[in-house]
Image: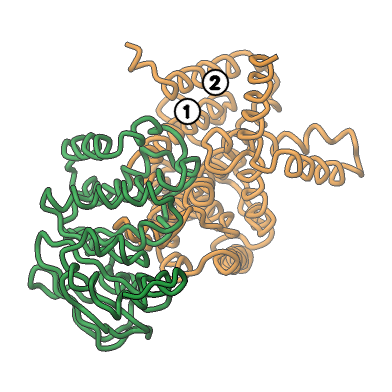
Amino acid sequence: MAIKGVSLSVAQGELVSLIGANGAGKSTLLQAICGLLSRWKGEVLFQNVPIKGIDPPGIVRKGISMVPEGRLIFPPLSVMDNLKLGAYTMYRRKQHHQIAQDLEMVMTLFPVLKERIHQPAGTLSGGEQQMLAIGRSLMARPQLLLLDEPSMGLAPLLVDKILKTLVDLRENGLTILLVEQNATAALKIADRGYVLETGRMVLQGTAADLLADEEVKRAYLGKDYEQFYEGLNS
Amino acid sequence: MLKFLNRDRLSYAVFFIAIAIIGLSVENYYYVQLLTFIGINTILALGLNMLMGYAGQISLGHAAFYGLGAYTTAVLTVHYGFSPWLALPCAILLSMLVAFLVGLPTLKLSGYYLGMGTLGFGMIVHIVFREWSSMTGGSSGFIGIPPLEIGPVSFSQIRNFFYLVWLTVLISFIVSKRLIHSRIGRALRAIHDSENAARAMGINTRNMKLEIFVFSAGLSALAGFFYAHLVSFISPGTFSFIVSIKIVTMVVIGGMASVWGSLLGASLLTMLPEWLHAFSEFEMVVYGLILMLVMVLLPQGLTRGLLDIYERTRSKKDQP
């Protein structure tokens, strides 16, 4: 197992960032929450109810949606079909009128998706695909949104845009757990943060504290290297 | 009005008119029979296409369900005196039940392993048809399956049988298309693309694969039912491994994930041997060559390939 003795909490309406280097176990943690891992020891509580052992469809129905690493959109399917797939559990419960509203909401959030609604999702650019992945997971009307490295492979401007969307969503009452390698960006928008290192939680605190923490700066924010190369002393 | 006349509805209407015209104009008994066989094969190919083309699950044992449909109706009508119309739901349900039981363990497999699993299943069923002589007539076959009739309409008239089969094809098309454009169809295509991502969407991939496998087996049994009552004689050879492969070829040649591709693939594979009689002993060589050429030149199957060619020539015209 990649992680051991890790504990973390996200309060309602909070935006929490989980940062750490490659292989620290961030994605494993998210997969465990979503029920995508079958055998592991531990506990997950959602709204004070244990959800460990529930299969992924059950987790989605409970109100937890994940934007997986590498986006995992369905490239041959149209943007519309991708979005509708996000609402799969809503269709099962025959909530068709709500789906239409949600589609509108996602397209207002990401107008570019409206322009490309009938295109195969594989023809979108990386940033658009990420927007689609986020839009798709919103279609399930989650209470908790998990994002696995949404900034991966995107240009800085797009990263800003995506992260700003997350802030907006949080302001509308969505609870968000954000997993990122891009520590600065992730901590800047977060309320609190956790630092995961080779399967252990090494640091936790408010995002502002973590941003100021020397250890985090050294290991994840790359500050002292910058200072070293530029010959500055702080 | 325009909404009512969407592309699908229009194509069904054209299809319906085509069936009527062909049914009225083709006189030769042999051709009408050949066209009826194409219809039966289309139902078979459509069933497998739903499983293979849309859900991305390969089955190399579909002839078994085809055979189960045919043998169930044969045994029930001849040995037990059932009316064929009562035997039909029995044949379909039995096939679906077997598909469910076989699917439970095998659909946990994927790729080549699923292919091997279904292949083994097909061979076992074929052996049962051959060896259970008291029920199935063994390798010498099963004779005397009664023709179909509804009141005064007898389907021993090949033209009536032609209409019956092709109307069933049309209905299967409509049902399949509706399924494809629904939540279920989207889920199937999602599974085809990435099972993990589909699971993350809240799709119960295991049940979904099982359901489409069972649906597909039901369509195959329907085709088997028609075959048995059309030919009135069945033997294990009609439901052997080679036939399973032939159904896969129809789907691949016609076009995966395309309802009309099933029609095209079934037509081509049923007609080719007839056209190729002129080559006498080289028949199989030419047959194989044609299939190879189609696959090399139009790897996505006839439907997609021809559409691509059409679009390319059109865009060339638009930009001189």
What amino acid does circle 1 point to? Leu
Screen quadrant of the N terminus of chain B:
top left
On the image, which quarter does residue B199 sit in? bottom left
Q: Chain of mark 2?
A: B
Considering the image in quadrants, where does the C terminus of chain B appear? top right
Let me know if residue B146 appears in the view: no
Whether residue B271 is visible to the viewer of this picture, yes or no, is yes
- Badge 2: few (under 14), some or many (20 or more) residues near its Cα, within 10 Å? some
Indicate the position of residue A224 as horizontal and vertical percent values: 38, 75
Residue at 69% over, 21% down: B313
Please give the residue where the numbered disc 2 appears in the rendered image. B19
Q: Is residue B24 left or right of residue A82?
A: right
Q: Are marks 1 and 2 in contact (CB under 8 Å)?
A: yes
Which residue occupies the extreme top position in the image?
Answer: B1
Rendering coords of residue A48 (x, y %): 7, 72
Q: Residues within 10 Å of mark 1 (few under 14, many from 20)?
A: some
Disc 1 and disc 2 on one polypeptide chain = yes
Q: Is residue A89 left or right of residue B291?
A: left
Pinpoint residue A194: horizontal percent, then vertical percent.
23, 75
Name the residue carrying label 1.
Answer: B167
Foreground of the two, A210 or B116: A210
**Residue depicted at x 51% and y 17%:** B14
Q: CA distance from mark 1 to mark 2?
A: 8 Å
Query: Chain B hue?
Result: orange
- In this rendering, the answer to whether A115 lies above or below B228 is above
Chain identifier, colour green? A
